């Protein structure tokens, strides 16, 4: 079974990015994947310590250890961030700094983001460079959303825009295809 780790890099509540990540997780599960969602608001991490840069498994923090284990087990990743000053969030950068290249090497990574008032690809573009540095394989299809793509249901957001839903189907299908192909090599 394909196992995918999804990381939501927003601290907002409610968060459009978290809603996007949850929607993707449900789509992947409906296609037979096992998903693990790490919401950085709900499961905060310590500041990345450079002492453990080359040996992340030695991290003494239990939350960091849990994320490291999920990353090692993952066949693929989905990384999501809000647009913070035309880039991805600092809390997401910190999470990625806890992980290392061996966890991402030759694994597909889907990139998604929310731009608030407009659909913005800038955080995704920056993450694409980071994924390359981690030796991961960023899939070609990416998803950028904005606040008007969601409806508010109680204390959370839900994906509502039909064009976004269609793009999410393409995105999840492509992530699965890349994962199957790269696992077979």
Image: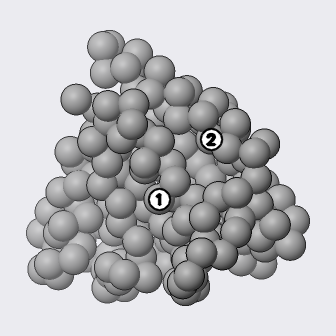
Give residue 22's mark. Answer: 1
Q: Residues within 10 Å of mark 1 (few under 14, many from 20)?
A: many
Q: Quadrant of the N terminus?
A: top left
The spot of residue 132 in percent (x, y) is 55, 42
The answer to which image quadrant residue 169 occupies is: top right
* Residue depicted at x 63% and y 30%: 170
Residue marked by disc 2: 168
- Image-based side of 156 in relation to 76, left or right: right
Whether residue 43 is situated above or below residue 37 in the rendered picture: below
The spot of residue 111 in percent (x, y) is 59, 48
Which of 151/18 is in front? 151
Q: Residues within 10 Å of mark 2 (few under 14, many from 20)?
A: many
The spot of residue 88 in percent (x, y) is 64, 68
Q: Secondary structure at mark 2?
A: helix
Q: Secondary structure at mark 1?
A: helix
Which of 107/43 is in front? 43
Q: Is residue 131 visible?
A: no
Q: Which of disc 1 and disc 2 is earlier in sequence?
A: 1
Whether residue 69 is situated above or below residue 82 in the rendered picture: above
Which of 105/31 is in front? 31
The spot of residue 135 in percent (x, y) is 45, 40
- Image-based side of 102 in relation to 39, left or right: left
């Amino acid at each position: 079974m394909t196992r995918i780790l999804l990381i939501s890099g927003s601290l907002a509540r409610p968060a459009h990015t978290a809603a996007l990540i949850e929607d993707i997780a449900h789509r992947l599960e409906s296609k037979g994947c096992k998903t693990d969602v790490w919401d950085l608001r709900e499961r905060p991490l310590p500041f990345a310590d450079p002492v453990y840069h080359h040996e992340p498994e030695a991290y003494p923090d239990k939350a960091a250890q849990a994320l490291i284990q999920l990353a090692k087990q993952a066949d693929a990743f989905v990384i999501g961030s809000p647009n913070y000053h035309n880039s991805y969030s600092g809390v997401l950068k910190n999470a990625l700094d806890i992980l290392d290249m061996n966890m991402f090497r030759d694994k597909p990574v889907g990139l998604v983001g929310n731009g608030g008032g407009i659909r913005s690809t800038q955080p995704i573009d920056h993450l694409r460079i980071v994924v390359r540095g981690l030796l991961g394989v960023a899939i070609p299809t990416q998803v950028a959303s904005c606040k008007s793509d969601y409806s508010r249901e109680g204390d959370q957001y839900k994906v509502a825009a039909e064009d976004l839903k269609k793009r999410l189907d393409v995105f999840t299908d492509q992530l699965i295809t890349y994962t199957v192909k790269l696992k077979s090599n």
